[in-house]
Image: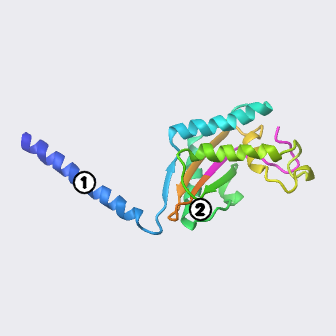
Amino acid sequence: MKNNLFRTVFTLLILLFIVKCSKDSDATDENSVIFSSLNENDIVLALEVHNDARAEVGVPSISWSNSLSQDATEWAKKMAEKDEMYHSSNDSRTNQGENLYYSSGSSPNPGDRASTLWYDEISDYTYAEIGSTVNANVMIGHYTQMIWSTTTEVGMGRAVSSSGKEYVVARYSPPGNWIGSFPY
């Protein structure tokens, strides 16, 4: 019995060592991408930023969607692989809005950081229809997507490129920012 326990523990340690070594070798690959969903604390913080912004304008809170988070993580991974930030095509994300963010380094709460920066666009926003000349030449679309009155869900994901850039994607359902419409 003692021998079997020893063999089992020894085998598990060998397997852990092999897995650890294979992960370490992947991390040094110049094309490697680190991706993960946001941690629980970051989700809470990011959702709080979104819902506080929504409360300020009197629209209902949104809830977290694991499905949207998975889609967002997949897109963040694609951007990290190319080491370039760019929007996905509307056809590839049917019924989903999208906000993007990247940083030259990683942060402990990237979802919260991205959400806060999107919210900060409020300082440039004047209440008007999307596409109005009132908001010409200012970046406000991230903020207006956050507060879009008919959006009910959000999910976010992140990935870090081999150069260390951190990409964060938020996906929203239903999407907002309809030209000619007011956000709320």
Q: Which residue is label 2 attached to?
A: 79
Quadrant housing the C terminus: top right
Asked whether residue 177 is drawn in magenta, I would say yes
The residue at 69%/34% (across/down) is 51
Q: Which residue is label 1 attached to?
A: 15
Query: Which amino acid type is marked by label 1?
Result: Leu
Element assignment for label 1: helix
Q: Position of residue 109 (x, y in %)?
A: 55, 44
Element assignment for label 2: helix
Q: Which mark is residue 65?
A: none
Image: magenta residue range: 169-184
Query: Which amino acid type is marked by label 2?
Result: Met
Q: Position of residue 135 (x, y in %)?
A: 87, 50
The residue at 49%/61% (across/down) is 33
Tell me which colouring the rendered structure shows. rainbow
Disc 2 + disc 1, Cβ < 8 Å: no
Asked whether residue 19 is drawn in magenta, I would say no
Of helix, strand and loop, which mostly describes the magenta segment? loop
Q: Is residue 136 left or right of residue 35?
A: right
Q: Nearer the viewer, residue 39 or 113?
A: 113
Quadrant housing the N terminus: top left
Q: Nearer the viewer, residue 58 or 117?
A: 117
